[in-house]
Amino acid sequence: MGDPENIGEVAKLMPDYLGFIFYEKSPRYVGKFDNLLTAKNLPESIKKVGVFVNANFDEIIQSVEKYSLKVVQLHGNEAPELCQKLKKSDLEVWKAFSVDQSFDFSITENYLNTVDAFLFDSKGTGYGGHGIAFNWDLLENYTFEIPFFLAGGISPENMDSVFSINNPAFFGVDVNSKFEICPGMKNIETLKPLFSKIRGNH
């Protein structure tokens, strides 16, 4: 999320989380947007997620305090030790992994006691945001109890396939480029049916 007015419109749909990118090379980098601090005024029930790529502990905590973040999503090569340190700082911690046909889900085992959730995204050039879906049948290979979010290429056209995923740890979806007008600006009209469908399946 980037534009304050757009953030307010999305907030009316009452998502569980809103994400803000703190990776300078991303087209959605928060530093490219003005008045992002207005996001502090969101309803308490909406948790603000800061997305970081290979940032150090002090950099992350500085952003957490400035923007009142409740969740950190680590999208780089962060070690379990950093996850553990952040978790002890009263933060919800998600560790993202880039998935392709050769991905070994057993590597998540190193993080089981250090994170609150995993996020499985499509492997591609860079760190996410490329709008490509991986083979979701691979999620059958994830057998741990830590919940996970699905990201990467989720669109209005493949939502039915999302709801056919059968894994007890499947917790939520992270939607981005396919629901955007431009980077950092969500299309409210495509989000509305998504929210209706999700809530209708609960």
Image (cartoon, helix red, strand yellow):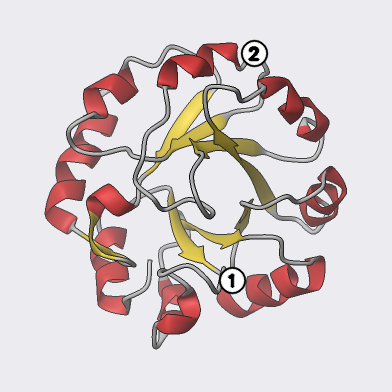
Instruction: Give the residue pinned by disc 2.
Output: 143
Mark 2 residue type: Thr
User: Residue at the location (73% across, 21% down)?
Assistant: 106
Q: Position of residue 107 (x, y in %)?
A: 75, 27
Mark 1 residue type: Ser
- What is the secondary structure assignment of the residue under circle 1? loop
Q: Position of residue 201 (x, y in %)?
A: 28, 22
User: Residue at the location (49% across, 29% down)?
Assistant: 171
Residue extending farthest bottom: 34
Quadrant in which the C terminus is drawn = top left
- Marking on residue 68: 1
Between residue 120 and residue 45, name the one nearer to us. Answer: 120
Determine which quarter of the picture holds residue 36: bottom left
Q: Position of residue 114 (x, y in %)?
A: 80, 40
Quadrant in which the N terminus is drawn = bottom left
With respect to residue 110, does 16 lie above or below?
below
- Can residue 98 be seen in this snapshot? yes
User: Residue at the location (78% across, 25% down)?
Assistant: 109
